[in-house]
């Protein structure tokens, strides 16, 4: 498992990377991070707590996002992973991107793994992983699958100062980054297994 969280540009990049590495991965939603103060604040907190690896495309847009994050996040807590310029198009697209370069989603697995290794990604001991907060814990705490679950989850998001538009898996990853399962159960109740 990679100790640092990884931030990529979009959901397809996240999907590609999640098939290769055991890591917490967040998306900037493209240029959305530049207009989403909550997401940027969250990424700062993640960087402080776990460290962060920025992995953007090698095109101009990717460097604009990278440079924005470089200026907004704590420099000593952020690593930069770079992919090479490889020309082509991703299979899901009808046309190549504006500059004709493949993005993170189109890179071969060995290139992505080498980029993370070269950036200094730290592997953690997977022999005794910390006990994670689970979807069952969220359900038992009334944060999913029940009446008023959405309102309770929104209150927790506000309490933890999380971005508003996190999907369910990203929400769970974010909560796991910010607190232990024991802290969660003590504070919000839930399953005592």
Image: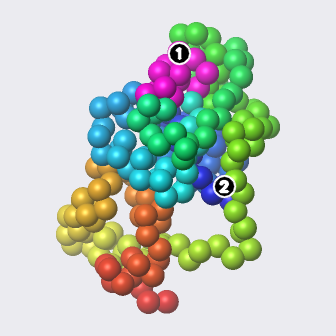
Residue drawn at point x = 61 percent, y = 21 percent: 58
Q: Is residue 79 visible in this depiction of the protein? A: yes
The answer to if 66 sits in the magenta stretch is yes
Q: Is residue 188 above or below residue 31?
A: below
Position of residue 124 measured from the top left corner of the image (x, y, whole percent): 70, 62
- SS of the residue at dot 2? loop
The image shows residue 77, relative to residue 56, as above or below, that is below
Name the residue: 64% across, 73% down: 129
Q: Judge the density around disc 2: few (<14), some (14-19), many (≥20) Cα neighbours within 10 Å.
A: some
Magenta stretch, residue numbers: 57-68
Q: Which residue is tagged 2? A: 2
- Which residue, as the protein is rendered here, is positioned at the far bottom? 192
- Position of residue 178 in the picture relative to residue 24 (left or right): left
**Pointer 1: what residue?**
60
- Residue occupying the point 42% across, 85% down: 191
Q: Nearer the viewer, residue 165 or 90?
A: 165
Q: Is residue 80 above or below residue 64?
A: below
* Residue 165 can be seen in this image: no
Q: Is residue 189 left or right of residue 77?
A: left
Left-right relation of 150 to 57? left
Q: How many marks?
A: 2
Which quadrant is the N terminus positioned in?
bottom right
Instruction: Give the mark nearest the N terminus, 1 or 2.
Output: 2
> In the depicted view, which residue is nearer to us: 51 or 160?
51
């Amino acid at each position: 498992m990679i100790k640092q969280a990884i931030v990529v540009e979009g959901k397809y990049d996240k999907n590609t990377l999640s098939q290769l590495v055991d890591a917490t991965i967040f998306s900037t939603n493209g240029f959305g991070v530049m207009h989403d103060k909550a997401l940027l604040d969250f990424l700062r907190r993640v960087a402080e707590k776990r460290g962060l690896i920025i992995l953007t495309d090698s095109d101009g847009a990717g460097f604009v996002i990278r440079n924005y994050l470089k200026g907004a996040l704590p420099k000593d807590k952020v690593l930069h992973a770079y992919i090479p310029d490889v020309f082509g198009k991703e299979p899901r697209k009808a046309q190549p991107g504006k500059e004709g370069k493949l993005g993170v989603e189109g890179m071969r697995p060995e290139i992505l793994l080498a980029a993370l290794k070269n950036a200094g990604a730290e592997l953690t001991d997977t022999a005794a992983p910390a006990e994670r907060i689970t979807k069952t814990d969220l359900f038992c705490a009334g944060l999913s699958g029940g009446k008023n679950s959405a309102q309770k989850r929104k209150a927790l998001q506000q309490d933890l100062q999380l971005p508003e538009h996190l999907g369910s898996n990203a929400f769970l990853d974010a909560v796991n980054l910010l607190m232990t399962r024991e802290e969660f159960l003590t504070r919000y109740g839930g399953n005592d297994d």
